[in-house]
Every structure is written in structure tokens, then in C-alpha cells.
Amino acid sequence: MGFLVVFLFWLNLISVTEGNFDIDFPQLEFGERKVDLKGDAMFVHNNPVELVCHGRHDAKVKASYGGILYNTPYKLWLMNENRSLSFLSEFVIEIVVPTPHELVRTPFGFPSESFSIAFDNRIDPSNPIPTDTYVSVFRDSLFPNITTTMDFNLHIAQKIKVQIVYKGDEQNLLVFVKDVDNYKFPSLVLNHSVDLGAYMLDHGGPMFIGISAVSKTCAETYKFNSWKFRVKVTEGNFDIDFPQLEFGERKVDLNGDAMFVHNNPVELVCHGRHDAKVKASYGGILYNTPYKLWLMNENRSLSFLSEFVIEIVVPTSGNKPTDLGNGFAFFLSPEHELVRTPFGFPSESFSIAFDNWIDPSNPIPTDTYVSVFRDSLFPNITTTMDFNLHIAQKIKVQIVYKGDEQNLLVFVKDVDNYKFPSLVLNHSVDLGAYMLDHGGPMFIGISAVSKTCAETYKFDSWKFRVKDCS
């Protein structure tokens, strides 16, 4: 059995896609789909897409083939500039296996003209004990251009995340695989030099993209949970002033309870409600393309500045001080979705959190904290701040990372006060190693959590600067 990613050529093109997409199939209405199902693939509302077999496990059933394709081709080759774009394809697929002894080798049913990356959990019939699994690259052929074993077991039932990164400027293909239910870092299973630009030029330009799977006797099922595709990583700078921004001009995505209203700041949580009976509100904002902050060829990270203005709105009555919390955070992450953590940042992220939680046993506001989290709900470092976040105010936060010195500096300032910013954190950390562990480009964002809507966080402006200190 096995599954693969396919970039295939198709004639009679009507329109060409250039943007990004995120699809969470269990949450998707059928009419909203931007994908086409092929073969035996089946979509059921509130469930993952089942690529093959639909839960049947019967050795008498003939081979089941299924796939899913984005329904317009992607422009990944710039003809005028004679170069290919970089892209990231990330998807979560669940392998459902009834019993190991039913696993058999299956052929791959990809199109005759395609550039394909296949994940193969074949078993030698003469040696039915599962051993190696493979990742292979095929180019317009049934015979692979390259095959290598993976230090990752695909012979067991599990849910896995696959990240496929192509770096157009370096003509390099990286493939990572990760067990979703395991907190280990993704495994790099393939590092392959290939000129995809030449392939696309040979085939006339835009490419359809898709995922397919084969199960020879329905011994296993592949359930397709989500799919994210990103074209072109960001390398420049940005300045965003939300009250002055038209909704259609946004370069950011809102997550959770965050809300944008024209001529107003982005409200990350609560939307002006202050009610102790309301459950916790989570919200965040992410720049909608990932940033290239790690130079692979030079083995070093870039320096950056993230500066934003956030207003903490605390009601004057109706809430006890114990209702305050939890706070807000800035983060770098390979993921594009927030989760319901104490600060709302993604489960895989490098995050700097500003905490105005109050100990219920001591409801008098005293210390506030800044903490650093790395792929965990437990901080790597926490320190008190000589800055009070328990009062209503508008503050400016500056986060400076010096790549050449591997040093992180965090400053906080009351916007309405003429004092200099306060240095609240000075921390040595190798962010380059973190980005290398997670495959390269990072999404950047701000998240916030309000425990019982006792306070609101209004996000006024955001500036991001990348600097090469070489």
C-alpha cells in the first residue's frame, strides 16, 4: 500500500491559481470544496476524506484507487524570469490498518505524466515481517528516479503530517514526516536536488497538485484530514496599520475569535463583551505567508524586529481582579493554526508570552511575567517584568532577534508615557537550530487569551523587519 503527492500536467487550462490555501476537511461544507475527488475517494460532511476502501477491510476486494486534486492549476514557473517559485505542501493523513499481516505491496496509480513523491510501505512477500518503508521520486515514469529508505515506520496505524518543501532558488526538495500524536520533531526523510522549473517548462507551465493512494486489497484505509499549500516564502518587511486598512487589503489571517472591523483595531478576543459568565476567548492574527529567516546554504539565521501596539481594555466595574488573564504572545511557527493553549499560540511554535494572570489565592495584582516557550506548554524561561500589565493601557512591544549573536531582546513601553522602553528579557537562544528542526520558513503571529472576557486586547499596528547582518 502507499500514498503519494502528484504534480501533474493537464491540457485545456482555464484559470491559474497563484495564492495559498488551507483546507480542514472535517470542518468543510461540501459546496465549499475547492478540490476534486478522483477514483474511489469519498467526502462525508464532518469527516476526513477517505481516499480508498471506505472502512472496508476485505482481502477479496479488488484494489482501491483514490485521490484528491486542487481544482485549478498552480503557476509555479515564472516564464519571463526563467525561474521556479518555492512552495510548501503540508497534509495530515491517517493510516488505518486492521492487522499487520494483511499488508501487501501495491503499485502506484499516478498519472503517466507527473512529478510524484511516493511513500511506500511495501512488504516483501517472501519476508512478511514489516521492515523498511521508502520514499521515492518519479518523473513521467513507473520507475523511480531515486528511492531511499525512511527512518519512519509506516506499517502501523497512525496519523501523520507530511511536509514537502521545494526551494526554487536552491533547486532543492525536502520532505519531512511526523507522527501527529508524538511531540518529537519531524523526521527529514528526503533531501533531493531537482530542477522542477525545467520539468514545468517541458510540460508547458501550470501544474495541478494532488494526493493519491492505493490499497491493493483494501487491507488499509487512508483518511485525509487537512491540506495546506503555500507558494513563495516572504523575505521582505511589512507595516500594517489596522484602523487605516481596507478589509480586502489585509495580508493577515484572523484565527479563533479575532475580528476585524473597518476603521478600528483588530479585536483579538471578546469583542467588547465583559462578562464573567463567558467562557475563555481565544484569538490571533498571522501574516499569511511564511517568512524565510534561515539561510540553509550559509547555515545561519537572519536578524529581525517585530514591533506591535496592543491595547489592553479592562472594564471599570463588574469584574473582580481574579478574572484577569491569561495574556498575549508573539510566535514563530511552521503551523498556520492557533490552538486553545493558555496563550493561544500553535502547539509547534517558538513563542514569547506576556502573562497578566493573577493567583486566585492572592488577588492583588503584583508581578507580571514574560516567558519563552518552545514546542511546549511549559516555558523554557520565565522572568518577572518591571512593567504592570494589570491596568488598562496601550503598550508597544519590540522583539529583537540578533541572528549573528543568537540573542533575543524584548522591550515594552507605555505608548502614552514618554519614558524609554523597558528591557524585560535578554535571552541567548539559537533560533536557527529551531527553524532547521522544523524545515525552514516560519509563520509569524500574535495570539491572546482572555479567561472570562474580563479584558479585551485590541491590536492597533504591526511592523516586521528582516535584516541580514552578514
Image: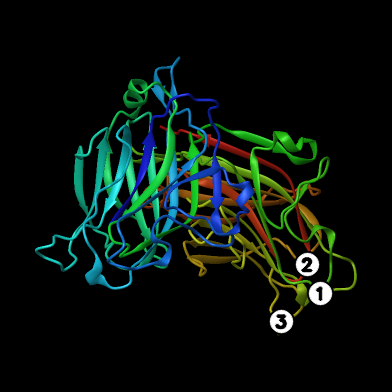
Question: Are discs 2 and 1 less than 8 Å apart at CB?
Answer: yes
Tell me if 248 is positioned left or right of 14 in this view.
Answer: right
Residue 402 in the image, given as x and y percentages of width and height: 48, 43
Residue on which disc 1 sits:
276
Can residue 439 be seen by looking at this rendering? no
Residue on which disc 3 sits:
360
Q: Is residue 105 above or below residue 172?
A: below
Dot 3: within a 10 Å radius of its alpha carbon, few (fewer than 14), some, or many (20 or more) residues?
A: few
Q: Nearer the viewer, residue 273 or 318?
A: 273
Alpha carbon separation for disc pair 1 and 3: 15 Å
Q: Residue at 42% across / 33% down in the picture?
A: 86
Q: Nearer the viewer, residue 448 or 128?
A: 128
Dot 2: within a 10 Å radius of its alpha carbon, few (fewer than 14), some, or many (20 or more) residues?
A: many
Alpha carbon separation for disc pair 3 and 2: 16 Å
Q: Amino acid at mark 2?
A: Cys
**Residue 180 lies in quadrant:** bottom left
User: What label does residue 70 carry, if any?
Assistant: none
Tell me if 360 is positioned left or right of 335 in this view.
Answer: right
Dot 1: within a 10 Å radius of its alpha carbon, few (fewer than 14), some, or many (20 or more) residues?
A: some
Q: Which residue appears farthest toward the right when viewing the image?
A: 317
Q: Amino acid at mark 1?
A: Ala
